[in-house]
Image: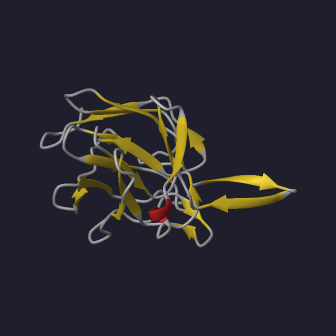
Amino acid sequence: GGSGHVDGVLTHYSNGARYNLATQKWTVLSDCQHLEAFYGRSTVSTGSHLLVWGGFGNSGYVQLGAMIDVTTGSCTAISTANAPAKRGYHAATWTGDQMLVWGGYNGSSSTPTPGGIYDPTSDTWKTMAKPTSMLETRNSSFVWTNKGFFLWGGQYSSSMQNKGGLYRPNRSAE
């Protein structure tokens, strides 16, 4: 996926490819065509799969995603039941067994809330509790530290932020 200008026209692409380091060749992921062309999405690696979520496409901001097997290239749609609201430019990270999705932008003046926690083993979502110290920013810097999800800066409404927070699943935010 992604977008680019072709002869002055913005074009969205719905295809993808995987790169083989040993052969130095690209292979097109042809079975991900159920995904709309989009950008501003998140991609996290589980080690065996890529989890792709959200973004902006031809129909606006989307609430969809895919799990892509890095060995075979097979692509499976991620469930949208109980998933976070449509969004792009959000933060996402892999905890070792779940993907956390936070903040972002949905095309309106408000930031989409709440975040979501995705379990690829059961293909289920649950709501991420809002930490009191974290704003639902977009274009933030973020990292998983093996103790929590640290988020810093980004844009909230129309202002840039110079603060952040630490979210620890099953614990309070700091």
Residue shown at 40% from the left, 65% from the top: 85
What is the x, y in percent for residue 82? Answer: 26, 69
- Number of numbered tags placed on the structure image: 0
Q: Quadrant of the C terminus?
A: top left
Residue shown at 29% from the left, 55% from the top: 116
What is the x, y in percent for residue 165? Answer: 33, 33
On screen, residue 134 above or below 126:
above
- Identify which residue, 17 or 152, lies in the foreground: 17
Seen in the image, is 99 located left or right of residue 6? left
Seen in the image, is 145 located left or right of residue 66? left
What is the x, y in percent for residue 10? Answer: 76, 59
- Identify which residue, 8 or 20, lies in the foreground: 20
State the scheme by which the image is colored.
secondary structure
Q: Is residue 91 visible?
A: no
What is the x, y in percent for residue 48? Answer: 28, 42
**Residue at the right extreme of this rendering:** 7
**Residue at the left extreme of this rendering:** 170
Seen in the image, is 172 located left or right of residue 28? left
On screen, residue 51 above or below 122:
above
Q: Quadrant of the N terminus?
A: bottom right
Residue shown at 42% from the left, 46% from the top: 43
Q: Is residue 154 visible?
A: yes
Residue shown at 17% from the left, 55% from the top: 121
- Identify which residue, 129 or 102, lies in the foreground: 102
**Residue at the front extreme of this rendering:** 23
